[in-house]
Image (cartoon, grey):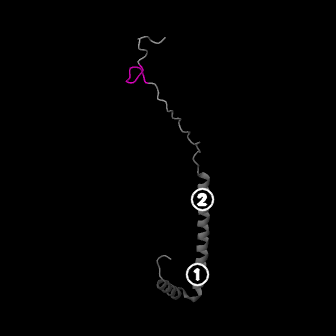
């Protein structure tokens, strides 16, 4: 708890008993306990409120449909005229029409 060992806590309790006296020490401890409980309750309420606001403000990303795979054709597209491997046309030189 706060890096204080058992020995240090006993020393603090003895000093408090000497300074405050046996009548005021239990009253002070009770008041301190109530104050800490109220503080803890307030912080839990605040944390719960922040969590609620964060949940309300959270915007989910839009759900996109899965992409369809592009069809892959096994046939090669015809080459443009004049490119190597292009069909030169009929052997007699006519345009084919």
Q: Which mark is residue 29?
A: 1
**In the rendered view, would you say 65 is above or below 85?**
below
Label 2 crowd bin: few (<14), some (14–19), many (20+), radius 10 Å = few
Q: Looking at the picture, how far across and down is residue 11, in whole percent?
A: 48, 86
Magenta residue span: 79-87
Q: Which mark is residue 51?
A: 2
Q: Nearer the viewer, residue 92 or 17?
A: 92
Residue at image position (57%, 42%) is 66
Q: Looking at the picture, how far across and down is residue 26, in whole percent?
A: 59, 84
Magenta region, main secondary structure:
loop
Q: Nearer the viewer, residue 67 or 83?
A: 83
Q: CA distance from mark 2 to mark 1?
A: 33 Å
Label 1 crowd bin: few (<14), some (14–19), many (20+), radius 10 Å = few
Does the magenta portion include 60? no
Residue 65 horizontal side relative to residue 90, left or right: right
- Mark nearer the N terminus (2 vs 1): 1
The outermost residue toward the left is 84
Does the magenta portion include 83? yes
Residue at image position (54%, 85%) is 20
Residue at image position (50%, 86%) is 10
Q: Looking at the picture, how far across and down is residue 94, in whole percent?
A: 43, 10
Label 2 with label 1: CB-CB less than 8 Å: no
Q: Looking at the picture, how far across and down is residue 76, in whole percent?
A: 46, 29
């Amino acid at each position: 708890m706060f890096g204080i060992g058992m020995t240090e806590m006993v020393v603090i309790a003895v000093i408090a008993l000497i300074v405050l006296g046996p009548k005021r020490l239990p009253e002070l401890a009770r008041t301190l306990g109530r104050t800490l409980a109220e503080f803890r309750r307030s912080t839990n309420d605040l944390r719960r409120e922040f969590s609620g606001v964060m949940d309300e403000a959270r915007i989910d990303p839009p759900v996109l449909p899965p992409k369809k795979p592009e069809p892959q054709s096994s046939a090669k597209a015809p080459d443009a005229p004049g490119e190597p491997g292009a069909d030169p046309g009929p052997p007699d030189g006519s345009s084919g029409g």
